Image (spheres, rainbow, N blue to C red):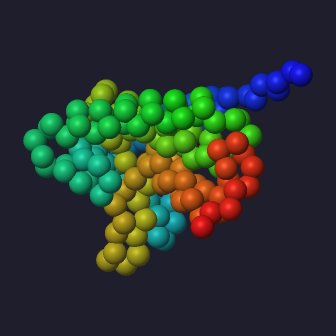
């Protein structure tokens, strides 16, 4: 009897690479064409606003004195390696988990490259309404949040690690 070998989830790293490339290119365009804190209105509630973020989400720890650069970089490396290992263990057909891990990896590496090259993350997507402003963010942040959302979706819907439907309690 022959055993059918399943394709590894590592093929999903193509999605990580694509997300990283889109993030990198959009940031490069912003840096090359805008001045720091310059804002370009796209819609009445949305601007491209070029900013530097020395911290994490919502500029958490941005004034911590510099150590946070290496702290957040280390976290990005560890999480990316761990998720890549888990991708290798998953079958490629397990699209929810593979997609989630790949999105987080692509986003984490996008922001990691910024931290290592610049010492900060380039943010430029800025939503607001009247006096309310949501903190600026970037494509990598979107990938991470969407990946986390898929992980939550999986937790509640129950796709099994083999790609089959598994009832969650």
144, 79: nearer the viewer: 79
The total of numbered circles placed on residues is 0
x, y percent for residue 54:
23, 44
x, y percent for residue 15:
62, 36
Q: Residue at x 10, y 41 (%)?
A: 65
Q: Residue at x 82, y 24 (%)?
A: 3
Q: Residue at x 69, y 35 (%)?
A: 91
Residue 65 shown left or right of residue 97 in the figure: left
Image quadrant where residue 136 sits: bottom left
Q: Which corner quadrant holds the C terminus?
A: bottom right
138, 41: nearer the viewer: 138
Q: Residue furthest left?
A: 65
Q: Residue furthest front?
A: 1
Whether residue 48 can be seen here: no
108, 38: nearer the viewer: 108
Residue 116 shown left or right of residue 164 in the figure: left
Residue 54 shown left or right of residue 20 in the figure: left
Q: Residue furthest right?
A: 1
Q: Residue furthest top?
A: 2
């Amino acid at each position: 009897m022959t055993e059918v070998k399943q394709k590894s989830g590592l093929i999903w790293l193509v999605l990580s690479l694509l997300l990283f490339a889109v993030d990198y290119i959009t940031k490069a365009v912003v840096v090359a064409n805008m001045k720091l804190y310059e804002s370009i209105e796209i819609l009445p509630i949305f601007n491209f606003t070029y900013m530097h973020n020395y911290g994490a989400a919502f500029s958490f720890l941005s004034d911590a004195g510099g150590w946070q650069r290496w702290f957040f970089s280390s976290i990005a490396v560890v999480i990316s390696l761990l998720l890549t290992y888990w991708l290798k263990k998953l079958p490629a057909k397990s699209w929810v988990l593979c997609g989630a891990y790949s999105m987080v990896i692509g986003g984490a590496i996008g922001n990691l490259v910024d931290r290592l090259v610049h010492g900060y993350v380039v943010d430029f997507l800025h939503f607001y309404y009247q006096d309310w402003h949501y903190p600026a963010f970037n494509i990598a942040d979107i990938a991470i949040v969407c990946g986390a959302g898929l992980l939550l979706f999986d937790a509640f819907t129950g796709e099994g690690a083999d790609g089959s439907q598994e009832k969650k309690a």
